[in-house]
Image (spheres, grey):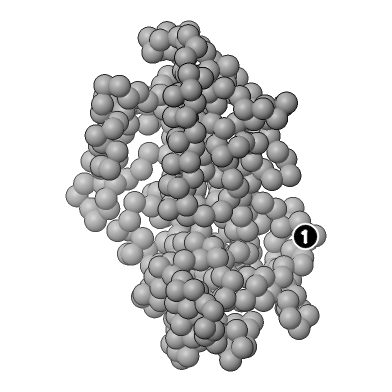
């Protein structure tokens, strides 16, 4: 793999299956390392902040993604797939990926590494239409061209563009960048296609603002209001997924900005309560700058953080005495933690691939931590 060379280097160590918080603290990390970088992302989904969103049947799209990817924290989740329509609020790449999974045939899904419980549930799904709600127009769409294009290649699925005037909102503009121009061109082509009778559908409902989740005891629909014309539309559904962005969460031992959802920092150097850099502590990624950008953005962000770390190293700011690697391993054992090293991770990977052998599936995932630990020990 891409990281194999680094991960197998004797100077590199991994301690997977260890949560930083109570049993191993931030203070423990800084006591055993000259520098600590937090790259924990933004794992909390933003709420809709509209009436009715407390109703069962309204889920974070990230939870649904975790469910079909076999994440142990979400493998036991339940989603109502009995209706013919699912509604997703938000139009980023996660929303498009969820739409694709909801509409793919069981045969197509059976060739992926989707978790078995999700494959079984989706094989009996009644969903034939996924409506993607976007507050703004196509020019401001959050999805990438690649994800948008991939939807058009799904067998038996039509892509429809609604809620906006094609002559106004899909027209090319000389000031559009390459990405935007490509999105609009593709949207125009989708809008011009005639739907095929009997096909499933992905419907992009642009310029629509969610105003209320409908239902008494559970989700029965979503009310949206036109951003431009104020028109009110009720979309019946029993499955509502929100994909409107993420927030970072507080990291034990670090300051946290509740307003922005990030750890306060200066170009990656973590700041303390006094506003001054905390020696040897850094952040990178979405916990550093908020949930925006893609892989390329994160690469640039990481380079900035590492540059600051090396500046501090060259300035002699990272020279304090710390515990050894053996001392850290002893501490993990003392706290009764069961870390998984790189060899253990490869054991899990091999076992999952073996479980998928003899079928079209690349692997069959473990969805329980005890099963993963058992495979790691073999």
Residue 9 image point, x, y percent: 26, 26
Q: Which residue is found at the position 38% from the left and 39% from the top?
A: 366
How would you rate the neighbour count of disc 1 (Cα within 10 Å): few for under 14, some for 14-19, many for 20 or more?
Answer: few
Q: Which residue is found at the position 48% from the left and 22% from the top?
A: 315
In the rendered structure, the answer to whether residue 255 lies left or right of residue 173 reads right
Q: Which residue is found at the position 57% from the left and 32% from the top?
A: 269
Residue 368 image point, x, y percent: 44, 35
Between residue 160 and residue 257, name the one nearer to us.
257
Query: Farthest residue in the left direction?
Result: 358
Q: Which residue is found at the position 32% from the left and 25% from the top?
A: 12
Quadrant where the image shows the N terminus:
top left
Quadrant where the image shows the C terminus:
top left
* Quadrant of residue 226 within the rendered picture: bottom right
Q: Check the image and report above or below for 357 versus 103.
A: above
* Quadrant of residue 260 within the rendered picture: top right
Between residue 22 and residue 27, name the one nearer to us.
27
Residue labelled with disc 1: 50
């Amino acid at each position: 793999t891409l990281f194999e060379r680094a991960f197998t280097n004797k100077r590199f160590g991994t301690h997977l299956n260890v949560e930083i918080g109570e049993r191993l603290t931030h203070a423990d990390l800084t006591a055993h390392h000259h520098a600590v970088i937090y790259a924990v992302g933004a794992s909390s989904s933003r709420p809709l902040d509209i009436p009715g969103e407390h109703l069962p049947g309204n889920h974070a799209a990230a939870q649904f993604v975790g469910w079909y990817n076999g994440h142990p924290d979400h493998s036991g989740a339940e989603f109502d797939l009995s209706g013919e329509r699912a509604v997703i609020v938000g139009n980023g790449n996660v929303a498009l990926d969820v739409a694709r999974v909801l509409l793919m045939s069981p045969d197509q899904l059976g060739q992926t590494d989707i978790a078995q419980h999700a494959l079984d549930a989706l094989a009996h799904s009644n969903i034939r239409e996924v409506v993607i709600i976007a507050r703004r127009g196509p020019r401001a769409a959050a999805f990438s061209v690649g994800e948008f294009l991939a939807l058009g290649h799904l067998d038996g699925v039509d892509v429809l563009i609604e809620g906006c005037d094609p002559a106004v909102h899909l027209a090319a503009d000389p000031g559009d960048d390459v990405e935007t121009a490509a999105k609009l061109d593709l949207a125009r082509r989708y809008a011009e296609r005639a739907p095929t009778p009997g096909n499933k559908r992905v419907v992009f409902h642009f310029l629509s603002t969610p105003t209320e989740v409908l239902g008494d005891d559970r989700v029965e629909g979503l009310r949206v209001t036109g951003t431009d014309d104020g028109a009110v539309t009720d979309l019946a559904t029993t499955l509502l997924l929100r994909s409107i962005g993420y927030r970072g969460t507080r990291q034990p031992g670090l300051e946290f900005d509740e307003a922005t959802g990030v750890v306060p920092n200066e170009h990656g150097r973590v700041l303390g309560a006094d506003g001054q850099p905390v020696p040897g502590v850094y952040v990178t990624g979405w916990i550093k700058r908020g949930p925006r950008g893609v892989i390329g953005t994160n690469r640039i962000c990481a380079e900035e953080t590492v540059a600051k770390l090396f500046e501090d190293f060259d300035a002699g700011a990272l020279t304090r005495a710390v515990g050894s690697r053996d001392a850290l391993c002893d501490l993990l054992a003392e706290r009764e933690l069961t870390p998984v090293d790189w060899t253990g991770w490869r054991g899990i990977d091999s076992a999952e691939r073996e479980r998928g052998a003899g079928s079209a599936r690349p692997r069959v995932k473990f969805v329980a931590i005890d099963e993963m630990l058992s495979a790691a020990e073999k």
